[in-house]
Amino acid sequence: MEFILDTANIEEIRTYAAVYPILGVTSNPSIVKKEGKISFFDHFKEIRKIIGEDKSLHIQVTAADAETMVLEGKTLLEKVDEKVFVKVPVTEQGLKAIKMLKEMDISVTATAIYTKIQGYMAMECGADYLAPYYNRMENMDIDAFHTIHSLACQIDRWHYNTKIVAASFKNMGQVNMALEAGAHAVTVQPELFHTAFSMPAIGKAVDDFQKDWKRIYGEKNITQL
């Protein structure tokens, strides 16, 4: 499994990358918008410094036509670094761009996936990652679990060099279901991770352990015995 942070916030990345076994960071224009009018390339260079060279960094293009998507992708590699995964929405023009980028041996994440056929076509075009939108599919009455499972089955059956990085979650239940459906990775907002580990039951268990310890050894910890 791969756990990836879905944010462009420097402090969130610095905080949570030190806590969780994170293998990368994803972003899109909507996520970037939350950070205000940042110095775009410098911002992502800073993210790379935080996560390191061995983690994946996914940055999305903004153009609608294939040729400009490819130019934007090349710009990202030139001005951030050569290891960036270029995120391309799976439209007809997006498929064309994916083919062109892969001919240049550029890493691609196919995004904005709602349907099986989008995923199948992106796989066939050589995408390295597929990003199906779990919650958005559910909101549209599309069976997100079945869609991801179908994509995973085709990857296994035909031995595609493609991974599924499920995205768009409103709760950890959806994250778990995406992994159970066969997603190789999930990209999750930091607040969802934080909420999952801040549930009262966990805190109570830890408090009870501390109270029981203190009844025996007082304020001494293990290193002080």
Image: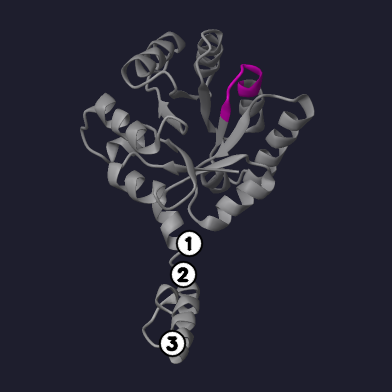
The mark lying in front, picked from 1 and 3, is 3
Tell me the distance, in whole angstroms, between the alpha carbons under discs 1 and 3.
31 Å
Query: Quick one: SS at disc 1?
Result: helix
Magenta segment boundaries in residue numbering: 122-129
Query: Which residue bears the numbered disc 2?
Result: 199
Bin the neighbour count of mark 1 within 10 Å (Cα to Cα): few under 14, some 14-19, many 20 and up.
few
The residue shown at (60%, 46%) is 141
Query: Quick one: SS at disc 3?
Result: helix
Tally of numbered discs? 3
Tell me which numbered mark, 2 or 3, is placed earlier along the sequence: 2
Query: Which residue occupies the extreme front position in the image?
Result: 225
Q: Looking at the picture, which amino acid does disc 1 mark?
A: Ala
**Residue toward you, 112 or 167:** 167
Q: Is residue 124 magenta?
A: yes
Q: Are marks 1 and 2 in contact (CB under 8 Å)?
A: yes
Q: Looking at the picture, which amino acid does disc 3 mark?
A: Tyr
Q: Looking at the picture, which amino acid does disc 2 mark?
A: Met
Query: Which residue bears the numbered disc 1?
Result: 196
The residue shown at (75%, 32%) is 156
Please identify the quarter of the rendering in which residue 152 is found: top right
Residue 165 in the image, given as x and y percentages of width and height: 56, 37
Please identify the quarter of the rendering in which residue 44 is found: top left
The residue shown at (43%, 87%) is 217
